[in-house]
Amino acid sequence: MQNWYLQNGKDSDVVISSRVRLARNLMDIPFPTKFTKEQAKKVLERVKEITPSIGYGLKFINLNDLDDITKVSLVEKHVISPEFAMNKQKIGGMVINDEENICMMINEEDHIHIQVFSSGLDLENLKNLAIEIDEKLDNMVNYASHEKYGYLTSCPTNVGTAMKASVMVHLPALTMTGNIGKIFNIVNGFGMNIRGIYGEGTQSQGDIYQISNKQSLGITENDIIKNLNIITERVIEQERMARKYLAKNSIDLEDRVYRAYGTLAYATKLSSDECKKLLSYVKLGTDLGIIKELNDSKISKLYLYNQPANLQKYVGKPLDGYEREIKRPEVIKEIMSA
């Protein structure tokens, strides 16, 4: 079975991926902001013990058993957070399946972060899957919850349903037409966050943004998903309108797209940041049918294996920064010509 981030989903010309996350804590152990190392180990042991009973082909992995390249490769896939991966003192673990569309981070900001992922726009199905997993866990552990405030979390903004739903969107045309600021206003005005590709405090890379719900208290899981779907549909509509507008002046658009394609196809040295900018135009050109040589599957692979850790995974050995810049164009040519 192919991993979710290499698949093609609904509205994937604009929506790259969807994620639903539920934050949960155990009743009888202090939250990660306050617990001791012994208590952190206790959380790991408890989750490890119940993992086989959860199903879905899930396996428990201790974070310390993974090398740094593997950890960063999971961050690049958006399966775990950068903070979780890079904290050397962290007594943490993961519960993950082979497809990597289900991943629970253990002892990140909360004891358990249940996360489910899909390519394209698929929030409703993800919500159902997350709740299904959550209900199984609820029968095996005692969650920290309050009759009035709902699920209790380390960060007060996550209290309530403790659900964070998000979509990753590719908005090159809105950027090129100078309308991206209007989209920020629409999204923020609708009670949503719009941020860089790794969430809070990060920048957009290659015209990719993350839209997520702000509120989780006093609102149901269904309402969170419904509201995010509504705003995402509006963003999709605006981006597609901007693409139609750009396509009217097809020479300028085709020139930009083919220049990016030519650089990717013939460069002998490329940084990851430059590659992301080029890929943004190449994906746009492929989605609009300007570039016939590529398809969604190849675009997904180019995005994944351009990134430093996954590039090293692809070639099967560690590379320093300069070596990666030399190897990256070779891997790109290999994927493009496959």
Image (cartoon, rainbow, N blue to C red):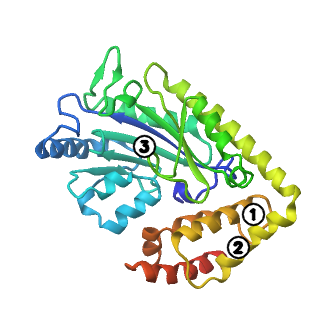
Dot 2: element: helix
Picture quadrant of residue 273: bottom right
Q: Which mark is residue 261?
A: 2
On the image, the x and y values in percent for residue 28 come to 17, 29
- Residue in front for this viewpoint, 87 or 119: 87
| Mark 1 lies on residue | 285
Mark whose residue sits in front, 3 or 1: 1
| Mark 3 lies on residue | 115
On the image, the x and y values in percent for residue 248 come to 88, 56
On the image, the x and y values in percent for residue 291 come to 77, 68
**What's the residue type where badge 2 is placed?**
Tyr
Dot 3: element: strand
- Residue in front for this viewpoint, 241 or 111: 241
First-in-chain label (2 vs 1): 2
Asked if labels 1 and 2 touch by Cβ distance under 8 angstroms, the answer is yes
**In percent of the image, x 30 and y 29: which residue is there?**
139
Between the C-alphas of marks 2 and 1, the distance is 9 Å
In the rendered structure, the answer to whether residue 69 lies left or right of residue 48 reads right
Between the C-alphas of marks 3 and 1, the distance is 32 Å
Picture quadrant of residue 172: bottom right
Q: Which mark is residue 31?
A: none
In the depicted structure, whether residue 76 falls above or below residue 263: above
On the image, the x and y values in percent for residue 182 come to 68, 40
In the depicted structure, whether residue 229 falls above or below residue 260: above
